[in-house]
Amino acid sequence: MPLGKTMGSWRVAADRQPVRKMKNTLRNKEDFTVKRPYRISVVELTRIVRFHLDGSPSPLGCNGYAGRPGLSKIAPMVEVHITLRGEPDPKTHYVLDIKKFDQWANEHIFPALSTCPGSTTVTQSLRNAFQTQNDFPHELISIKLQLSPYASLSLDATMPNVPLALTFTQTYDFAAAHYLWAHNADEAKNRSLYGKCSGIHGHNYQVEVVVEPESNDPIPSDKLDHLVTEHLLDAWDHQVLNELDDFQDVPPSVERIAQIAAARLVDPLAASNLKLREVSVSETDRTRARVRLG
């Protein structure tokens, strides 16, 4: 069928390019603002910048996705997560051009990290970087250093006129069996309520613990490891959770596991000058429960 004779949405011109019918097209920002039925003006935008800390004086390289500078030897990599909050520009529709995130991180973060400094130096570098937020057209609300796939250090502006919040996050795992069963229900009701989960089965649980550390020990990895191991993992790992005292009054759903994990940890951590902020428990890669303590 020759183009252009019966297919009205195609041109007969030599380029044979399709032309989409455009009805009531919003051609500029003013049209968009007026015609949409709601106004969500503030956006939080996060950019991740990856650095290899190999002693290089500057983060040269053309592969920002894999990390700069380019690798020539074994070297640690750190991800810097930078988050701004503001309204998109009416002309560019950006909160910020992502290249400017990269430039800012190159200037204010990389020099402080390039020599793999101690934890207190890293923390002060994050605080110093926050003082340069006037370089941005919008509010800088978070800088997170992803130190490894399982540990991170974050500095966050949680509320106006409130001191910046420093938190350290570490991830753990344990394997355990459980089944979901309500003591006050009969077997038929339990089978109906919990389905296959009423039968005994197991999970490889992941537990993410977020603490507010002491200023002189902002990356308390070893201390936190010992406390979480002693007060949580040793009690639950390779156990049938339903048989433990922790779960005699409630079944070990992921929600209850997160709550009881937080209850187990809050006092021992406080006794070691670590304020527990959050506990998250992942039962699978699609199911997670989180308890926030402030």
Image (tube, rainbow, N blue to C red):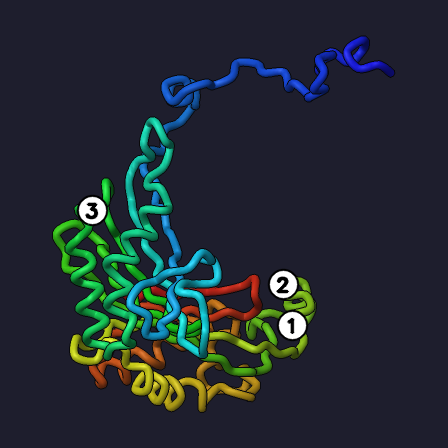
Q: Nearer the viewer, mark 1 or mark 3?
A: 3
Q: Residue furthest right?
A: 1
Vertical arrangement, residue 86 with respect to residue 197, above or below: above
Give yes or no for contact between labels 2 and 1 (Cβ–Cβ under 8 Å): yes
Dot 1 or dot 3, earlier in sequence: 3
- As helix, strand or loop, the secondary structure at mark 2 comes to helix
Residue 229 rendering spot, x and y as whole percentages: 40, 88
Marks 2/3: CA distance? 55 Å
Residue 140 rendering spot, x and y as whole percentages: 24, 50
Q: Residues within 10 Å of mark 3 (few under 14, many from 20)?
A: few
**Residue bearing mark 2:** 193
Identify residue type, mark 1. Ser
Q: Residue at x 67, y 75 (%)?
A: 199
Of 174 and 265, nearer the camera is 174
Marks 1/3: CA distance? 56 Å
Of 273 and 119, nearer the camera is 119
Residue 18 can be seen in this image: yes
Q: Quadrant of residue 291?
A: bottom left
Residue 260 can be seen in this image: no
**Residue bearing mark 3:** 135
